Amino acid sequence: MSNAAQALSRVLGRGSAHEGAHHWRTQRLTAVALLVLGPWLIISLLLLPDLQFATLRAWASGLVNAALLALLVVIACWHSQLGLQVVIEDYVRGWLRMTTLVVSVFLHVLLGALGLFAIVRLALVAP
Amino acid sequence: MATRPLSPHLFIYRFAYTMALSVLHRAAGILLSFGLLLLVAWLLALASGEAAYASFSAFAGSWPVKLALALLLVSFCYHFANGIRHLCWDMGWGLERQQARASARIVVVGAVLVAAVLLYLFFGKGIGS
């Protein structure tokens, strides 16, 4: 936006672009979701008779379990990316900052995709 | 831009233990980000078949990885409990100094207790064996 446009926006009292709180809000929303999904995973695993291959396969291929696992992986990756972004913005300087930010986003998306792929395969393909 | 003072400027403050909790929240969060690698590796191994899962279990059963898993569980409990504290602050609750100090103590004691119980239960279940 040009300086003139910025000055005009200020005179017209338009305020910000209303996206300033988006990162903050998403970080909190994903945190609240993980407040439920984290304990769900821990308690589910503890309630299983053992942590052997067959037991875990049967558990992970359940419809609700697969859906919640998928949510957990996606939201955990999202929350992790938002958190690391703040850390990087606070401590990394110069060209390294943008580099680490981009690498972090790519790795988190890759991690989420791999996790989702594994969960779908667990649910749909017999061992 | 580089010449302006930027947050966090930690060293102009007198140290208070609530600051240590804040730093630990970040440290635990960073550790948990790396823990996600293990979670996804676990799911991939489980999805890849019995042989892959056996080698993942052997990996997870080795002492350095067991130690890392224990550290991750402690980090999770702490980041979880302190995260609730942060969410309360976001809603405007407990922002007074005395309240923040009391909640700090509750968070540390609660996280340590829950982590101890979970460690006992998980390792009793033969995690990585």
Image (cartoon, helix red, strand yellow):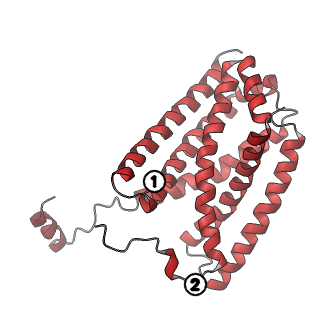
> x, y (%) of residue A9?
17, 67
Question: Which residue is denoted by mark 1 in the rendering?
Answer: A85
> x, y (%) of residue A111?
54, 35
Q: Is residue A76 above or below residue A83?
A: above
Closer to us: A2 or B23: B23
- Disc number for residue B14: 2
Q: Are marks 2 and 1 in contact (CB under 8 Å)?
A: no
Q: Residue B44's image quarter?
A: top right
Give me the chain letter of mark 2: B
Residue at 67 percent across and 58 percent down: it is: B80
Tell me the quadrant of the picture where the C terminus of chain A can be found.
Answer: top right
Q: Residue pushed farthest top? A: A126
Q: Callout 1, which amino acid?
A: Gln
Mark 1 element type: helix
Closer to us: B15 or A36: B15
Give the number of callouts: 2
Query: Is residue B18 something one can see in this rendering?
Result: yes
Give me the chain letter of mark 1: A
> x, y (%) of residue A14?
22, 67
Closer to us: A10 or B69: B69
